[in-house]
Image (cartoon, rainbow, N blue to C red):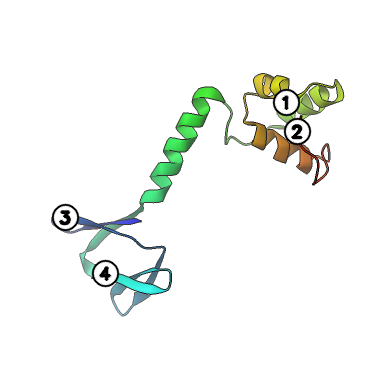
Amino acid sequence: MVRVMLEDEDYCDVPADLMTFDEGVVVFWREGEEVGRHRQMRIRSLEMLASRSMGRRIEEARKTFPNAYRSWSPEEEDRLKELHEGGMGKDVLVKELGRQPGGIEVRMRTLGLLSDDEKLR
Protein backbone atom coordinates (compact mmCIF):
# COMPACT_ATOMS: atom_id res chain seq x y z
CA MET A 1 0.00 0.00 0.00
CA VAL A 2 1.28 3.44 -0.93
CA ARG A 3 -0.02 6.68 0.57
CA VAL A 4 0.11 9.37 -2.11
CA MET A 5 0.22 12.84 -0.54
CA LEU A 6 -1.17 15.33 -3.05
CA GLU A 7 -1.21 19.11 -3.21
CA ASP A 8 -3.81 20.92 -1.08
CA GLU A 9 -3.29 18.50 1.86
CA ASP A 10 -5.21 15.79 -0.01
CA TYR A 11 -4.07 12.15 -0.12
CA CYS A 12 -5.13 8.72 -1.32
CA ASP A 13 -4.03 5.19 -0.45
CA VAL A 14 -3.20 3.06 -3.47
CA PRO A 15 -2.95 -0.75 -3.13
CA ALA A 16 0.28 -0.94 -5.13
CA ASP A 17 3.43 -3.06 -5.02
CA LEU A 18 5.25 -1.24 -7.84
CA MET A 19 5.54 2.30 -9.24
CA THR A 20 6.76 3.37 -12.67
CA PHE A 21 7.27 6.83 -14.14
CA ASP A 22 5.89 7.67 -17.57
CA GLU A 23 6.14 11.20 -19.04
CA GLY A 24 5.26 13.16 -15.92
CA VAL A 25 2.88 10.53 -14.54
CA VAL A 26 3.45 8.05 -11.73
CA VAL A 27 1.77 4.75 -12.57
CA PHE A 28 0.90 2.35 -9.71
CA TRP A 29 0.77 -1.40 -10.23
CA ARG A 30 -0.31 -4.40 -8.18
CA GLU A 31 0.50 -7.92 -9.29
CA GLY A 32 1.12 -6.72 -12.85
CA GLU A 33 -2.12 -4.76 -13.22
CA GLU A 34 -2.34 -0.97 -13.27
CA VAL A 35 -4.27 0.24 -10.21
CA GLY A 36 -3.85 4.00 -10.48
CA ARG A 37 -1.94 6.98 -11.81
CA HIS A 38 -1.29 10.53 -10.72
CA ARG A 39 0.41 13.47 -12.38
CA GLN A 40 3.85 13.75 -10.88
CA MET A 41 3.49 17.54 -10.46
CA ARG A 42 0.54 17.02 -8.05
CA ILE A 43 2.40 14.57 -5.80
CA ARG A 44 4.09 16.05 -2.73
CA SER A 45 5.30 12.75 -1.25
CA LEU A 46 4.90 8.97 -1.29
CA GLU A 47 4.86 6.78 1.80
CA MET A 48 5.07 3.00 1.87
CA LEU A 49 2.46 2.07 4.47
CA ALA A 50 3.85 -1.42 4.93
CA SER A 51 6.97 0.11 6.45
CA ARG A 52 4.81 1.48 9.26
CA SER A 53 3.49 -1.98 10.11
CA MET A 54 7.06 -3.30 10.26
CA GLY A 55 7.86 -0.51 12.69
CA ARG A 56 4.99 -1.63 14.89
CA ARG A 57 6.17 -5.24 14.69
CA ILE A 58 9.67 -4.22 15.76
CA GLU A 59 8.28 -2.11 18.59
CA GLU A 60 6.12 -5.00 19.82
CA ALA A 61 8.97 -7.53 19.56
CA ARG A 62 11.28 -5.26 21.56
CA LYS A 63 8.85 -5.28 24.48
CA THR A 64 9.83 -8.92 25.04
CA PHE A 65 13.16 -9.06 23.19
CA PRO A 66 14.91 -5.67 23.66
CA ASN A 67 17.59 -6.36 21.03
CA ALA A 68 15.26 -7.74 18.35
CA TYR A 69 16.12 -6.52 14.82
CA ARG A 70 19.26 -4.72 16.00
CA SER A 71 22.65 -5.34 14.40
CA TRP A 72 24.90 -7.78 16.23
CA SER A 73 28.04 -6.27 17.74
CA PRO A 74 31.29 -8.28 17.84
CA GLU A 75 30.90 -8.41 21.64
CA GLU A 76 27.41 -9.90 21.34
CA GLU A 77 28.68 -12.50 18.88
CA ASP A 78 31.48 -13.39 21.32
CA ARG A 79 28.94 -13.71 24.13
CA LEU A 80 26.78 -15.96 21.94
CA LYS A 81 29.81 -18.18 21.24
CA GLU A 82 30.65 -18.37 24.95
CA LEU A 83 27.12 -19.31 25.93
CA HIS A 84 26.90 -21.89 23.16
CA GLU A 85 30.25 -23.43 24.08
CA GLY A 86 29.05 -23.52 27.70
CA GLY A 87 26.14 -25.71 26.58
CA MET A 88 23.44 -23.13 27.21
CA GLY A 89 20.10 -23.81 25.55
CA LYS A 90 17.63 -21.65 23.68
CA ASP A 91 15.88 -20.23 26.77
CA VAL A 92 19.15 -19.04 28.33
CA LEU A 93 20.39 -17.57 25.03
CA VAL A 94 17.13 -15.67 24.53
CA LYS A 95 17.21 -14.28 28.07
CA GLU A 96 20.91 -13.39 28.07
CA LEU A 97 20.99 -11.83 24.61
CA GLY A 98 17.53 -10.22 24.57
CA ARG A 99 16.87 -11.56 21.09
CA GLN A 100 14.23 -13.67 19.40
CA PRO A 101 14.99 -17.39 19.00
CA GLY A 102 14.89 -17.11 15.20
CA GLY A 103 17.40 -14.25 15.20
CA ILE A 104 19.75 -16.21 17.45
CA GLU A 105 19.43 -19.29 15.25
CA VAL A 106 20.25 -17.33 12.09
CA ARG A 107 23.28 -15.71 13.73
CA MET A 108 24.51 -19.10 14.97
CA ARG A 109 24.32 -20.44 11.41
CA THR A 110 26.20 -17.39 10.12
CA LEU A 111 28.92 -18.00 12.72
CA GLY A 112 29.09 -21.71 11.90
CA LEU A 113 27.74 -22.77 15.29
CA LEU A 114 24.72 -24.53 13.74
CA SER A 115 24.44 -26.41 10.48
CA ASP A 116 21.70 -25.51 7.99
CA ASP A 117 19.47 -28.41 9.08
CA GLU A 118 20.15 -28.05 12.81
CA LYS A 119 17.66 -26.33 15.15
CA LEU A 120 18.34 -24.21 18.21
CA ARG A 121 17.41 -26.20 21.32
The foreground one among 48 and 14 is 14
Residue behind mark 1: 90
Q: Mark 1 or mark 2: name the one nearer the start of the chain.
A: 1
Residue behind mark 2: 120
Q: Amino acid at mark 3?
A: Asp
Alpha carbon distance from label 2 to label 3? 50 Å
Q: Amino acid at mark 1?
A: Lys
Q: Name which residue lies at 80% across and 45% down.
A: 117
Q: Secondary structure at mark 3?
A: loop
Q: Name which residue lies at 81% across and 28% down.
A: 81
State if disc 2 and disc 1 touch (CB < 8 Å). Answer: yes
Residue behind mark 4: 40
Where does the N terminus fall, quadrant-wise? bottom left
Quarter holding residue 85: top right
Residue behind mark 3: 10
Q: Name which residue lies at 41% across and 63% down.
A: 17
State if disc 4 and disc 2 touch (CB < 8 Å). Answer: no
Q: Secondary structure at mark 1?
A: helix
Q: Mark 1 or mark 3: name the one nearer the start of the chain.
A: 3
Quarter holding residue 44: bottom left
Q: Mark 2 or mark 3: name the one nearer the start of the chain.
A: 3
Q: Mark 4 or mark 1: name the one nearer the start of the chain.
A: 4
Above or below, 85 against 41 in this view is above
Left-right relation of 29 to 66: left
Across and down, in percent, residue 56 comes to: 42, 36
Alpha carbon distance from label 4 to label 1? 51 Å
Across and down, in percent, residue 70 comes to: 59, 34
Q: Amino acid at mark 2?
A: Leu
Q: Amino acid at mark 4?
A: Gln
Instruction: Single out the mark in the foreground, 1 or 3.
Output: 1
